[in-house]
Amino acid sequence: MRWFVQMYRWRALSSALWLCVLAAPLLMLYTTLTSPYHHPLSSGGLSLNIFFLYCLFLSSLMVVMVIYTVTTTAELPVYATRVSMLWSVLRPTHLVTVAVFGFSGGVKGHCLSSLAGYRVWSGEWAFLTAHATLAGVAWGVRYYVDKRRVLVLPSIQQGALFSLRGHTLAHCTQGLVMSLKDLRWIYPLYLLCHWYLSWEVWLTFELVILLLLTGTLSQALRSFALTLFQTFQTQAIAFPIVAMFASESDHLLTHALQANNPLLRALGFLDVCNLATLPGRRAQVFSLDRAGQPGVWRDVSTQCLTLIHKLTNKLTGGDSSTVSMETTTTSRTEVLPPERGWCSLEPPPLTRRGVVERGAGLWSYSPPSNVTSLQPPPPLDNTHSLANQLSGLSGRVRGIPAALVEAIKRKPFFIHFLSTLPGSDEQTLYSDSRLIVCAVRGLSELAVASYTQDQYGVVQRSLGQVVSSLIHLSMALDKHVKAPLSSTPSTGDALMALEKNSKYAIKTAVLTALHRLEATFTRERRAFALTDQQLKYWTSQH
């Protein structure tokens, strides 16, 4: 999908340009607040220096945008343990990214401290630059631990600038809160700089206020850049449904739904949800191809139903093989055949010759007379014996790492890092929740619209399968969604809302789809080849 890679890059470039346009006034405001008398704009040399610092600061922002372009993904990572969470930061490529974030933060600190009037290589300049570098490293760590590199599809599509207008104040507030949290590193950093590195720096009230201003501006621009990048990259794409020209064959919606690129696939399902509300594009889904087959509807419905069936199998355990754990009771006489009575666990018939009394409950016996004497066993093959010993030794050696891991897991210190994090299983289960919500909404909208718009009956042929799949998914969700939908947790963060409310969003979408289908096909529901249990469940969801 070369065309999508080019679109991805153009969207990243557009977000970077808009970031420069919005960051320049904030930088000028910072210069006015921190040094109103240090840098008169009438001085040509100082004005040239300020312009250079502005360009250097904006270049550091471009480095941040490049990192976002390379590292963001549409797949939601799930951290099962704290070890996997730490590995997400300690991975070599991620460590390089964290180092680049720190370097970019140091460049921002240099520019802002120089704009505030501090001389380069002075104690205050070094202190502000070191603090900005540590803040950049902390942002890089949170970038991976808090999963900020995940592109989340918005529930409501808005214009890029319209959706960003309400985030400006929120990002400034978030930057101030994060800079206040980073102030806890001021005193250790001050001791390191003043006493151990012998820097001439004094922690004054003016320096603390300047730290708050620089930290707020840097953190706000980092988070705002990430929001700007995500807003541009998650804008909906109207994929062509039917190729009018040969050059559009790679741009089709059906190709996007089957793409390996997670972002392209997510945008494809988002387009399925959007086109279901547009009559002009719906008509192309209900059309027939040159062979007289409903190719578009077949491909779209297949991809949507595949997602629904996959989640249903996860919820019901249908995708995992079940092992029967039935135990059978076997008598001792079945383990040791009764015909060899002298070696059976049951005592043989007591005879005067075969029994020697040794006290209460103790007895011994000799074999009956009709049993021939035992022959000595054949000599063992030393070659096979040595091979068996070597294979057993190699098996024990191979089992040492597993036994060592199990022994480590029992230690209290390692239990904290190796224990399963709460909610990780649920996050793995509903990792494709946003795609499933789009698929359910798109299928239900297309099915309802087919009642009046489908001229060839392409949807009616598979409408029973769609309804049956939604009913099975709803019945499977009933066992996992215990709380009522009105008591779902609410949060302002999109990623946190995706992790906390994923199962509630799917359940709401499925119930809404069943309600609309039942209201539209009330008379035809008997023709869907549903079981009595499914019909009863469908009609009870009112």
Image (cartoon, helix red, strand yellow):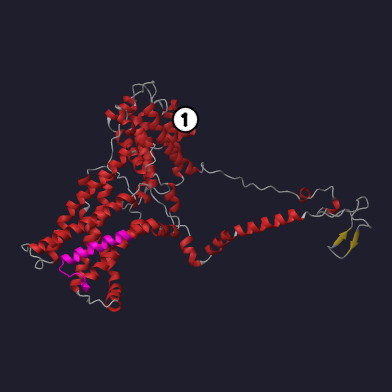
Left or right placement of residue 239 versus residue 317 in this view: left
Neighbour class for label 1 at 10 Å: few (<14), some, many (≥20)? some
Residue 234 sits in quarter: top left
Indicate the position of residue 54 as horizontal and vertical percent values.
Answer: 17, 58
Q: Residue at left 49%, top 64%?
A: 414
Tag 1 secondary structure? loop
Please state, as top left, top right, bottom left or bottom right, where the N terminus lies in the image: top left
Q: Magenta stretch: residue 49 in it?
A: no
Residue 53 sits in quarter: bottom left
Viewer-closest of 327 and 176: 176
Amino acid type, residue under disc 1 in the picture: Leu
Viewer-closest of 145 and 398: 398
Instruction: Tell me: residue 89, above or below residue 329.
Output: below
* Whether residue 19 is visible: yes
Left or right placement of residue 312 versus residue 218 in this view: right
Indicate the position of residue 176 as horizontal and vertical percent values.
Answer: 23, 62
Q: Residue at left 23%, top 62%?
A: 108
Which secondary structure dominates the residues rendered in magenta?
Answer: helix
Please state, as top left, top right, bottom left or bottom right, where the C terminus lies in the image: top left
Left or right placement of residue 351 versus residue 277 in this view: right
Residue 99 sits in quarter: bottom left
Q: Which residues are magenta?
A: 99-124
**Total numbered labels:** 1
* Whether residue 512 is visible: no
Indicate the position of residue 162 as horizontal and vertical percent values.
Answer: 20, 46
Indicate the position of residue 262 as horizontal and vertical percent values.
Answer: 37, 43
Q: Which residue is mark 1?
A: 530
